[in-house]
Image (tube, rainbow, N blue to C red):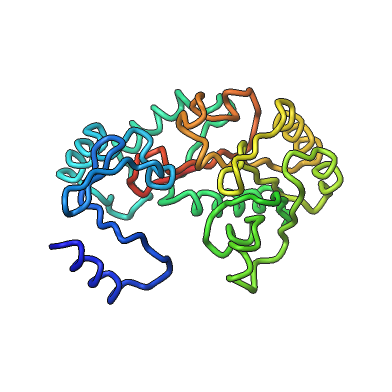
């Protein structure tokens, strides 16, 4: 298939949610990708922060091939046990912050954030969730409602209720917003989509203490920052910040749709 045929087929049959670049990528290896004509490019997007160890890395492709020859979907889904899942859980217990001792898997970061919000509400019996301006937490209706950017929110009106927004990095804003109605505070340790905003060294630890004092659960959205994107395995773990939920995706599987919290 030529690039022109690919362009024509996708433009004709695929829902036009994006204005695409006229490049048809055929394969990748490491940081490089090649189009159908064989032209090589450097992928500075890393697949939107996903391909943390490069394209077509043998560790990932060989693991997927091995497992696909055994089983891809357990009977009765998560209601049966899996040695592969047990092995992954054991590995995660070695790298997650020590206070996080249970994991639930999802297909994406948005699903992980959505599930963490649901569980925080169930545990606390409260409804409100605090997020920050310029944040990004996903594109489900719930996580779009938790996203602090009008460009990602307004197009999906009406949104879900019970979301409040404060200024990122502002402890006074957080302290004022916390009350008996707040189930969770969801925050990116470093804002990504909103412009790579880095908080002060004391912000996350103090925010954690304020949440704990108020009976509010803190959700660290490490979908973009997790798995060594900033140096440590996770920002919160590297800084010694104790959170109640840590959501992860993207780098956890290097391009395969996978997440967890």
Q: Does residue 39 appear to the left or right of 100 in the view shown? A: left
Question: What is the number of callouts on the image?
Answer: 0
In the picture, residue 3 is in which quadrant?
A: bottom left
Q: Residue at x 24, y 72 (%)?
A: 8
Q: Is residue 216 visible?
A: yes
Q: Residue at x 58, y 57 (%)?
A: 143
- In the rendered view, tell whether residue 231 sits above or below residue 153: above
Front position in the image: 115 or 45: 45
In the picture, residue 172 is in which quadrant?
A: top right
Where residue 60 sits: x, y (%)? 26, 36
Q: Is residue 83 visible?
A: no
Q: Residue at x 23, y 72 (%)?
A: 9
- In the rendered view, tell whether residue 158 sits above or below residue 110: below
Q: Does residue 3 appear to the left or right of 243 in the view shown? A: left
Where residue 120 sits: x, y (%)? 65, 48
* Quadrant assignment for the N terminus: bottom left
Front position in the image: 256 or 261: 256
Where residue 74 sits: x, y (%)? 28, 50
Q: Residue at x 57, y 29 (%)?
A: 235
Where residue 80 sits: x, y (%)? 33, 47
């Amino acid at each position: 298939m030529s690039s022109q045929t690919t362009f024509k087929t996708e433009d004709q049959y695929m829902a036009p949610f994006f204005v695409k670049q006229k490049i048809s990528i055929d394969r990748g290896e490491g940081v490089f990708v090649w189009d159908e004509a064989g032209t090589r490019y450097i992928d500075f997007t890393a697949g939107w922060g996903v391909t943390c160890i490069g394209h077509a890395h043998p560790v990932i492709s060989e693991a997927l091939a091995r497992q696909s020859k055994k089983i891809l979907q357990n009977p009765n889904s998560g209601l049966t046990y899996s040695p592969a899942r047990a092995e992954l859980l054991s590995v995660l217990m070695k790298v997650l912050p020590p206070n996080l001792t249970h994991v639930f898997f999802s297909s994406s970061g948005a699903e992980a954030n959505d599930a963490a919000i649901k569980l925080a509400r169930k545990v606390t019996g409260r409804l409100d969730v605090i997020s920050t301006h310029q944040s990004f937490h996903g594109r489900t209706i719930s996580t779009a409602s938790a996203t602090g950017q009008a460009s990602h929110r307004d197009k999906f009106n009406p949104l879900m209720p019970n979301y409040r927004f404060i200024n990122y990095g502002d402890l006074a804003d957080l302290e004022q917003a916390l009350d008996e109605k707040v189930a969770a505070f969801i925050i990116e340790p470093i804002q990504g989509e909103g412009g790579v905003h880095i908080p002060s060294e004391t912000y996350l630890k103090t925010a954690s203490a304020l949440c704990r004092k108020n009976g509010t659960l803190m959700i660290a959205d490490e979908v973009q920052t997790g798995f060594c994107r900033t140096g440590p395995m996770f920002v919160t773990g590297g800084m010694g910040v104790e959170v109640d939920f840590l959501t992860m995706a993207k780098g956890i599987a290097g391009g395969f749709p996978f997440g967890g919290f």
